[in-house]
Image (tube, rainbow, N blue to C red):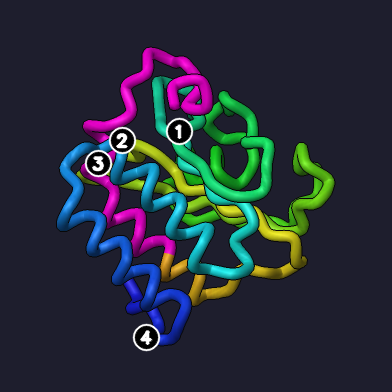
């Protein structure tokens, strides 16, 4: 995996995520705080969502940003985030066909644990072409950092995250 640029806002976000991982032991809280950091620290990340894999669906977990939240359930393979899980690779598009008309770019990054997709990070932006290699490398690094928390956290029995908090 390529290294992430040392420039702000990425380095600052990684430092904040590292602090969360070192002080917080509850997986659900780690995931909630990481999504908030991604939205708050990276200016072009208008909405950041974590979807967790359950069989052949993705269930919406914690999210932050411009709302409302995305769909609460997505089939694996659908949209960039579902394709990221299906193919275990980063997927992006220009937002055409997105449920929210303000979305101009989307990226989906699989979260893998021992080679198996357990979740995906989805980021929406208002600017076309908002995501480059730096974003890809950064989000892949975040995915590695949170993978174990995705595996053991977020057990709501299928209730949307927004109804749990």
> Are the two marked residues, 1 and 2, in contact with CB atoms closer than 8 angstroms?
no
Q: Earlier in the sequence, mark 3 or mark 2?
A: 2
User: What is the span of residues highlighted in magenta in the rendered image?
Assistant: 139-165
Distance from disc 4 to disc 2, alpha carbons, whole Å, reads: 28 Å
Magenta region's main secondary structure?
helix
Question: Which residue position is annotated with label 3?
Answer: 149
- Which marked residue is nearer to the observer: mark 1 or mark 2? 2
Which mark, by number, is residue 28? Answer: 2
Q: Earlier in the sequence, mark 1 or mark 2?
A: 2
Q: Is residue 156 left or right of residue 78?
A: left
Q: Secondary structure under badge 3?
A: helix
Q: Secondary structure under badge 1?
A: strand
Distance from disc 1 to disc 2, alpha carbons, whole Å, reads: 9 Å
**Residue 102's spot in the image, x, y percent?**
80, 51
Question: Which residue position is annotated with label 4?
Answer: 6
Question: Which residue position is annotated with label 1?
Answer: 61
**Residue 3's spot in the image, x, y percent?**
33, 78
Q: Earlier in the sequence, mark 4 or mark 1?
A: 4
Around disc 2, counting alpha carbons within 10 Å, would you say few (fewer than 14), some (14 to 19), or many (20 or more)?
some
**Residue 165's spot in the image, x, y percent?**
44, 27
Residue at image position (22%, 32%) is 152
Q: Quadrant of residue 91?
A: bottom right
């Amino acid at each position: 995996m390529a290294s992430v640029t040392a420039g702000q806002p990425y380095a600052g976000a990684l430092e904040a995520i590292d602090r969360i991982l070192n002080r917080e032991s509850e997986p659900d809280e780690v995931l909630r705080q990481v999504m908030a950091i991604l939205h708050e620290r990276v200016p072009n990340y208008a909405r950041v969502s974590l979807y967790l894999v359950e069989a052949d669906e993705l269930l919406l977990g914690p999210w932050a940003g411009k709302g409302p939240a995305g769909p609460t359930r997505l089939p694996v393979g659908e949209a960039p985030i579902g394709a990221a899980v299906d193919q275990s690779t980063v997927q992006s598009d220009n937002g055409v066909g997105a449920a929210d008309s303000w979305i101009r770019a989307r990226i989906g990054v699989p979260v893998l644990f021992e080679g198996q997709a357990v979740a995906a990070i989805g980021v929406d932006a208002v600017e076309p072409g908002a995501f480059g290699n730096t974003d890809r490398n950064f989000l892949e690094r975040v995915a590695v950092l949170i993978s174990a928390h995705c595996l053991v956290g977020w057990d709501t029995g299928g209730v949307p995250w927004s109804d749990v908090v």
